Amino acid sequence: MKIKHLAAALALGAMTTTSAFAAALPDLPVPFKSGAGAMNDGVIYVGLGTAGQDWYKLDTKAKSPKWEAIAKFPEAARDQAQAVALNNKIYVFGGVGKITSDILSVSNEVFEYDPAKNTWSKLLTRSPIGLTGHTVVSADGKNAIVVGSVNKEIFDGYFKDLDYAAKKGNKALTDKINADYISKPVKDYFFNKAVLQYDPQANAWSYLGDLPYFGTAGSAVAVDPKDQSVFVVNGERKPGLRTATAVEFSVVDGAARFTPAPDLIPAKGEKVQEGVAGAFSGYSNGTLVVIGGANFPGSTAKYAKGKNFAHEGCTKTWRDEIYTYADGAWTFAGKLDTPIAYGVSIQNGDELIMVGGETSGGKATTDVITVSVKDGKVVTEK
């Protein structure tokens, strides 16, 4: 997957090309989307999602990096779990799947992977809320920061109701359940707006503060390596409806201190930025890079006119745009050849590594793409 417009001169906004590329890494051994991943000591770990219980590692420091299978996840496979490296171990939070029965449900579980022993452990803790559609990052390498999530009770209840209607063979009831679920206003979904922190040493959760708007799911979240500030970009505000909002925060004395950021700008040639869910994000040379994601063009206008089922009649669109944010402003920085969303973002020093994801129509990919900003230009290599 190459970029159509390989670079953007960030200060001037002029599109140029460059021959300087980030390092290429091998494709994944399996198509991979909606999974979890993290990097520890130069080694990338990914699994779950379309990989099922399988996990793989890639040592980016090796002379000839190659993917290797590691110990399988010890319990039910799940989508949309999130992983982070803390204290030289990998921690996996939440996800959605058939965790305890044949009905989909949101997990509040936490698992730990020890690379030195190649073993998994289920921790004796539970997140204060169910976690799916969340993002997990770390600013200090010791504590996990959790942003966003759907509401577990509403989400689980929806699938329990569908299961009940299916067992009754009652299509009219199924249709009513679906209509009721999709037709509420944003506020009635109770998406998580609390920013949480997990300390693995104390095995304890704490509350850092609330996002200064509504809760989100599927936001792109990245940590600036220079000052450990956390940037939250877009996400769903209800099923089928995104937001263009963005915010930055730092954790000071156990509390998140928020700084408003401008909304993501519209894509080139478009008048409205619907916002994206499932985008990739990371920092390079002080510049935030946001790539891809998915949305429903037209849904924002419909919701503004009072249509709660905002994406009805709209087409889900996987995005190929690349945006950068620096000096308080967004810049449109080109396009990928192929749209992509719902993969894993890895911050590797001063570059972003995009692992897997899905392309138009939801097809999982094996692509691994490195992205960096060099001499004021965004460059990639696959």
Image (cartoon, rainbow, N blue to C red):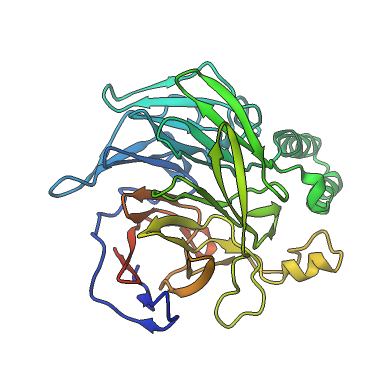
Residue situated furthest front in the rendering: 253
Residue 319 rendering spot, x and y as whole percentages:
53, 68
Q: Quadrant of residue 361?
A: bottom right
Q: Is residue 293 positioned above or below 54 on the image?
A: below
In the picture, the quarter occupied by the C terminus is bottom left
Q: Quadrant of residue 130?
A: top right
Which of these two is toward me, 200 or 326?
Answer: 326
Residue 179 rendering spot, x and y as whole percentages:
83, 52
Which of these two is toward me, 375 or 53?
Answer: 375
Residue 118 rendering spot, x and y as whole percentages:
29, 25
Q: Residue at x 40, y 56 (%)?
A: 283
Which of these two is toward me, 238 or 325?
Answer: 325
Q: Is residue 72 positioned above or below 148 on the image?
A: above
Q: Residue at x 47, y 20 (%)?
A: 122
Q: Is residue 121 positioned above or below 336 on the image?
A: above
Compared across the picture, whether 146 is left or right of 209 comes to left
Residue 4 rendering spot, x and y as whole percentages:
38, 77
Q: Is residue 54 positioned above or below 340 on the image?
A: above
Q: Is residue 224 visible?
A: yes
Compared across the picture, whether 12 is left or right of 156 comes to left
Compared across the picture, whether 250 is left or right of 354 comes to right
